[in-house]
Amino acid sequence: MFTICLAIAMSCQKKSENVPENVLFSENFDDTDLTKRGWYDETRIHIVGDAQSGEGCIEYEWDNELNGCGSSSIRHLFEPTGEVYIRFYLKLSKGWGWTGRNYHPHLTHFLTTENSEYHGPAASHLTLYIEPVNGKLRLGATDIQNKDMPHGLTQGELRGGYNGKLYDSKEVLFNDDKWHCIEAYFKLNTLDIENDRPNPDGIIRGWFDGEHVIEHTDVILRSTDFPEMKINQFLMAPYFGPGLLPHAQKLWIDELVVGTNRIGPLH
């Protein structure tokens, strides 16, 4: 199944002759034919106008704290890589409310070749996060599934069944209902196989409307338990935990690009 999904994703990508070599896939969300362009695992897609660019954007909506009535979560496989860059535009509805907790809402994720093409986030061998939390841009990582591996967890100790290392912007950035350009870059750390240990040289970077707001170059994202680990899956799954939605609200995502080099904001 993994090979089939990847083949579909890559064949769809190759149809666009104007896609730069460093782009793994891109999506304008101008129509609902996402599965024809390599997306999968969706149950409903809601495309609306008032996009950042083009004819449409994807809408996620919560009408109460128990029901997400907009688009469902959706995935896209891509060629495995040791580093990945993402750019997308995000707009929050007027009067957007935060949870007031240091977690949630979740938004977009990357997973790796160490898990299947339908594996859930968080309880994996590595999940990478790009999301707004309490107004700040957050990049993060969890690896809960590694608790019983020979070298254990790389993203902090389990606390209440969860772990994670979080990298937030210093300033509150999301404070209006306008379109904003979100960019992130993750590079897996190298491994010292001879001495059976990871090298602290992984990279995490983030940008907001073109401004560099997150920078870490000493990150460990994997151990020698996973010498062949590569990043190969994008999961878009905006989500509020039970009881955490402050009120009915929406968000929109548009002009998404995943690649191996920075693309930058639209001009």
Image (spheres, helix red, strand yellow):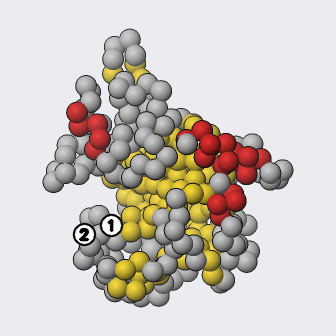
Residue visible at 38% across and 52% down? 121
Residue 77 in view in this figure: yes
Disc 2 element? loop
Q: How far is mark 2 from mark 1, CA to CA?
A: 7 Å
- Identify residue for label 1: 104
Left or right of 147: which side holds 114? right
Residue visible at 66% across and 49% down? 9
Mark 1 is on which residue type?
Answer: His
Left or right of 266: which side holds 73? left
Up the image or down, 135 lies above or below 34; here it is below
Residue visible at 37% across and 48% down? 141
Q: Could you tell me which quadrant the N terminus lies in? A: top right
Mark 2 is on which residue type?
Answer: Arg
Asked whether the beta carbons under mark 2 and mark 1 sit within 8 Å of each other, the answer is yes
Q: Position of residue 40 (x, y in %)?
A: 57, 57
Q: Position of residue 129 (x, y in %)?
A: 42, 54
Q: Could you tell me which quadrant the C terminus lies in? A: bottom right
Which of these two is toward me, 85 or 16?
A: 16
Disc 1 element? loop
Residue lying at the far right in this picture: please name it: 17
Up the image or down, 97 lies above or below 75; here it is below
- Identify residue for label 2: 101
- Label of residue 261 in the image: none
Residue visible at 40% across and 59% down? 138
Up the image or down, 187 lies above or below 16; here it is above
Residue lying at the far front in this picture: please name it: 1
